[in-house]
Image (cartoon, grey):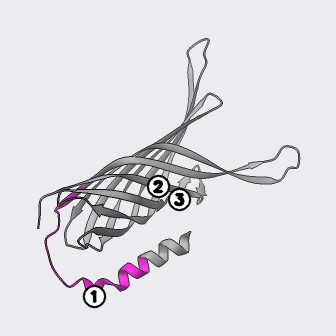
Amino acid sequence: MRRIILGTIGLLLLSIPGWAQESSYPKAEVFGGFSISSMGVSSTDPTTGLTTSLRDSFWGWQASADLNVHRHLGFVGDFGGQYKTVLGIGMSNYQYMFGPQISMRMDKVNPFVHVLFGASRLSAAVTDPVTGLTAAVSSTGLGMGIGGGLDVNISNKLALRVPQFDWTPIHAGGVWNNNTIRIGIGLVFKAGEK
């Protein structure tokens, strides 16, 4: 997976000289949509004592705002929240990330790559049905988003993001969880024109 992401970034960077042609581009782009976060969770099998790895999917939302300073360079604020309930325990994963984004703008499509840094918050809560009391635990740590996506232009002011894909490692509780990916789809609204 990392090879695919790094290869895509490399191809976009190598194609920068071909971007010399100038045309208009939006000053800002706002994305909102649906997201899935898939996390790899390690646990110990009680019968064998061996470590096993499971994947669990969290469903939620994703939003971002991109301020473009050049036709091919913008700065993005990316936010997301995904949720799941397992055996009465409500779990959530929030991301708050910022960083540069490189776009290769074409008439019909806009492929892009970015490297984002910020915070990620993991939480779990359970409510006692008898007393109504809730016990919760959470951990906030370094969050990253390395990836990109493809916007398909519907008009000058609207595009469909199909999809955005990010490798989102999380450093929480003193441990790195490198086995997390996030996929988002939705609409991109474009404002202004340079």
**Amino acid at the residue labelled 3:** Pro
Under circle 2, the secondary element is: strand
Q: Residue 176, how many percent across, how many down?
A: 59, 58
The quadrant where residue 103 appears: bottom left
Does residue 109 belong to the magenta stretch? no
Residue at the image point whose x is 46% and y is 61% from the top = 166
The mark nearer the N terminus, 2 or 1, is 1
In the image, taking residue 147 as reference, residue 103 lies left or right, namely left
Marks 3 and 2 sit apart, C-alpha to C-alpha, by: 14 Å
Residue at the image point whose x is 37% and y is 79% from the top = 12
Q: Residues within 10 Å of mark 2 (few under 14, many from 20)?
A: many
Determine whether label 3 and label 1 are within 8 Å by CB: no
Q: Nearer the viewer, mark 3 or mark 2?
A: 2
Q: Which residue is mark 3?
A: 169
Q: Nearer the viewer, mark 3 or mark 1?
A: 1
Q: Which residue is mark 2?
A: 183
In the image, taking residue 182 as reference, residue 65 lies left or right, namely left
Q: Which residue is mark 1?
A: 17
Residue at the image point whose x is 21% and y is 65% from the top = 68
The mark nearer the N terminus, 3 or 1, is 1
Q: Residues within 10 Å of mark 1 (few under 14, many from 20)?
A: few
